[in-house]
Amino acid sequence: METPPAAAIRARNASKLFLDGAVVAFRQLDLEVRTQEILCIVGPSGCGKTTFLRCIAGLIDLSAGDILVAGKAVSGPPDSVAMVFQHFGLLPWKTVYQNAAFGLAMAGASRETIRDRVGHYLDLAGLSGFEQHYPYQLSGGMQQRVGLVRALAINPAILLMDEPFAALDAQTREILQNELLELMERPDERKTMVFITHSIDEAILLGDRVAVMTARPGRLKEVIEMPFGRPRDPEAVRSDPRFAELRAHIWHQLHTAPKRAAKTREVA
Ligand SMILES: Nc1ncnc2c1ncn2[C@@H]1O[C@H](COP(=O)(O)OP(=O)(O)OP(=O)(O)O)[C@@H](O)[C@H]1O
Ligand SMILES: [Mg+2]
């Protein structure tokens, strides 16, 4: 079997400035995402998390430095990367099936491939029977599952998740966290994942490592290795005494960012 490169994503001295440098989204970021790990990123609002994901996805260019995906510098959207957005990003005039098939169809996949792959993930996501429904006929949790199915169906090596569960109620969010953990622990479904969240609990629960960013301009403050193995039992993790210790530590890291940026801090 071919051994994948150790680092799936490597940001080197990466900076992104907007408005001719008036806004620095993040500065001199050095970060490595290991192959098939789940790296969660937490950081105050406005510290450049979404911008960083968009740079990895090749949707916007860096101002300085570079980002390597599978060893190659990103210049335009890499084939191996899919992104899941906070607000579902579904097309309201398309059915569940058409939305889920959208990425594959854009990539020029055959009808059979689309049917097989979309069918497989709709089934895993518990959406069989809803293929002909429209997004407005679904709950928020179901809509987010369609967004995830659309990303998974293209079989990306790397999944970029931008606060995918933020718009959901606490209970639905917990259900989807558990489902995602279960899915990522299947050997044939495991991916490299960068997962942005404002929830410290979610980061600890899902992540192999948690990266903490400072307030804008975003810099990397610390990357913390999670001590929980895989497969992971969410209930066991939540009740582990180390969970509370990690939560307190990350909270402290987030709340000791430089004072001048404190007004943009929204992480509780
Ligand atoms: N296209 C743009 N033009 C100008 N400024 C931008 C643009 N996109 C983002 N920014 C700025 O870059 C900074 C980082 O934004 P970004 O959306 O990456 O933050 P974030 O960490 O994802 O925040 P949140 O947690 O609120 O989602 C912000 O100050 C934002 O105003
Ligand atoms: Mg964001």
Image (cartoon, rainbow, N blue to C red):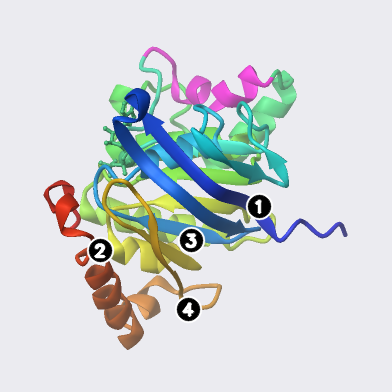
The x and y percentages for residue 136 are: 29, 23
Q: What element carries label 1?
A: strand
Q: Which of marks 1 and 2 is in front?
A: 2
Q: Residue at x 53, y 49 (%)?
A: 13
Question: Of the residues under marks 4 and 1, which one precedes in the sequence?
Answer: 1
Q: Distance between the residues labelled 1 and 3?
A: 20 Å
Q: Residue at x 55, y 72 (%)?
A: 231
Q: Where is residue 72 in the image (x, y as percent from the top left)?
A: 72, 40
Q: Mark 4 points at which residue?
A: 228
Q: Is mark 3 on a helix, strand or loop?
A: helix
Where are the magenta residues, as a range?
93-107
Ligand 1 positioned in quadrant: top left
Quadrant position of the N terminus in the picture: bottom right
Depth check: 251 or 189 in front?
Answer: 251
Tag of residue 254: 2
Furthest residue in direction left, as rendered: 263
